[in-house]
Image (cartoon, grey):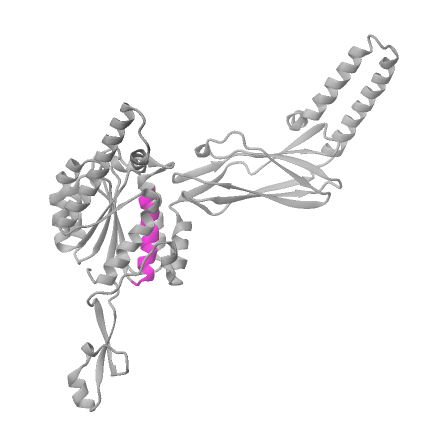
């Protein structure tokens, strides 16, 4: 009995009919002939309720399943499917309330679906997580009613399903496909004309029209009595590291996503591209001390190690210690490498404090300092000021924007590569810089 009561629900149609009968009873006070007709309607109403109870509760005739992917991609649209199988011999309406993870803060989820007798149907909806971690789905509640529609029976499925949210592997696959297909320019990635040579000797071969005459091997030419040239291939297996600042400056959110998450998404996509280009990739994160370190490797499966490591990285409410970073880089990264440093500077004084350490790192490695434009301040500077307070706010915002450009110039004057980017353009600009450095042979 208790189980029946817990799964028994009245529909809005039930209350509409009750309200109508109540009004008719009221009118029967003046029209007595209406009184007997109303009681006939009440008995018919009761019979329909008993009929629908019998139809819905005679057996368990609905099967449901929430189908989740193995993992969610952070900041991307992820699909969730609900499969329902109707074993009733008649058509049913199903109202679905899915208990979404607390991170989504959505408490008004309600979907409806119609399923014919002895058939099945699938409902799909989408979610967009904006932070990494474990997302726990609660009950999948299905409220079934027949075409009569006076009562509902509740079925409950899939209690406590958990999905982990990882850095954006959807974004990674997107750039992976475009890199293989050689169409990077379609999304803003550009090819850079090669300057100089960053090449490894491959073989000596006979000259053919179009070969670079500067590669003629005169000794081999004299020995074979025909023109021979050296053939080179792009230098491979160069170490490339993503260095991620996890201090408090990376806690700032834009469009619901922290700067740290933008950096993690970008470093995953960038590492994948570097592996496709036959370079070695590694990872380091730091705040007031060095945290996780992955030495550079060129194995394709190494990307899984990077993904699992990025999943567990979080910001610290502490200041970054660049002295510690310099010491760790000097001790653990012994070969000349490309270092992509994801960080943020809001004040030029903060940059000046770290410049000696950055310069020390840049003496041995190719250092790229990646920091962020404040897109909200940029929007403020581009807006029209209509009052004195708005003019003051706009002037201050313009000063902050100018300071960012000044930081870029100071870093470049000291031989440090820079990327100043809006958070949403981070991945494209990072891969662009990597391609440029490879093409110019700076590593």
Q: Is residue 264 magenta?
A: yes
Q: Residue at x 70, y 21 (%)?
A: 15
Magenta segment main secondary structure: helix
Instruction: Give x and y (percent) for residue 120.
Output: 66, 45
Name, please, the residue furthest toward the top.
29
Instruction: Give x and y (percent) for residue 5.
Output: 67, 25
The magenta-colored residue range is 262-278
Q: Residue at x 47, y 47 (%)?
A: 70
Name, please, the residue furthest toward the bottom.
225
The picture quadrant where one finds residue 142 is top right
Q: Residue at x 44, y 38 (%)?
A: 135
Name, please, the residue furthest toward the right.
33
Which image quadrant: the C terminus?
A: bottom left
Relative height, residue 245 to residue 305 (above, below): above
Instruction: Give x and y (percent) for residue 62.
Output: 67, 39
- Nearest to the observer: residue 412 or residue 88: 412
């Amino acid at each position: 009995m208790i189980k029946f009561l817990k799964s028994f629900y009245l529909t809005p149609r039930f209350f509409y009919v009750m309200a109508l009968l109540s009004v008719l009873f009221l009118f029967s006070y003046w029209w007595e002939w209406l009184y007997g007709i109303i009681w006939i309607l009440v008995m018919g109403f009761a019979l329909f309720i008993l009929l629908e109870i019998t139809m819905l509760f005679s057996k368990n005739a609905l099967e449901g399943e929430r189908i989740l992917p193995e993992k969610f991609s952070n900041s991307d649209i992820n699909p969730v499917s609900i499969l329902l199988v109707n074993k009733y011999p008649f058509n049913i309406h199903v109202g679905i309330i899915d208990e979404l993870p607390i991170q989504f803060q959505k408490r008004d989820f309600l979907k409806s679906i119609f399923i014919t007798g002895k058939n099945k149907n699938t409902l799909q909806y989408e979610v967009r997580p904006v932070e990494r971690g474990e997302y726990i789905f609660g009950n999948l509640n299905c409220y079934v009613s027949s075409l009569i529609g006076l009562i509902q029976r509740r079925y409950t499925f899939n209690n406590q399903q958990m999905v982990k949210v990882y850095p954006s592997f959807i974004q990674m696959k997107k750039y992976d496909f475009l890199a293989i297909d050689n169409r990077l320019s379609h999304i803003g990635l550009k090819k850079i004309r090669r300057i100089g040579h960053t090449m490894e000797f491959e073989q000596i071969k006979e000259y053919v029209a179009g070969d670079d005459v500067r590669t003629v091997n005169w000794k081999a030419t004299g020995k074979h009595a025909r023109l021979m040239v050296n053939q080179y291939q792009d230098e491979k297996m160069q170490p490339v590291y993503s260095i991620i600042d996890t201090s408090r400056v990376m806690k700032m959110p834009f469009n619901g996503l922290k700067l740290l998450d933008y950096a993690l998404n970008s470093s995953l996509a960038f590492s994948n591209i570097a592996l496709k280009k036959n370079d070695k990739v590694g990872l380091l994160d730091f705040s007031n001390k060095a945290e996780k370190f992955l030495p550079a490797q060129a194995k394709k499966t190494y990307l899984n190690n990077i993904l699992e490591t990025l999943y567990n990285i979080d910001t610290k409410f502490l200041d970054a210690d660049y002295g510690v970073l310099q010491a760790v880089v000097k001790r653990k990264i012994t070969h000349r490498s490309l270092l992509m440093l994801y960080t943020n500077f809001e004040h030029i004084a903060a940059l000046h404090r770290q410049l000696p350490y950055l310069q020390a790192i840049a003496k041995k490695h190719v250092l790229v300092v990646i920091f962020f434009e404040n897109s909200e301040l940029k929007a403020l500077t581009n807006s029209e000021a209509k009052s004195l307070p708005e003019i003051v706010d706009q002037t201050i915002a313009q000063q902050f924007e100018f300071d960012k450009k000044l930081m870029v110039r100071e870093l470049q004057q000291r031989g440090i590569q820079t990327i100043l980017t809006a958070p949403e353009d981070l991945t494209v600009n990072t891969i662009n810089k990597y391609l440029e450095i490879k093409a110019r042979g700076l590593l």
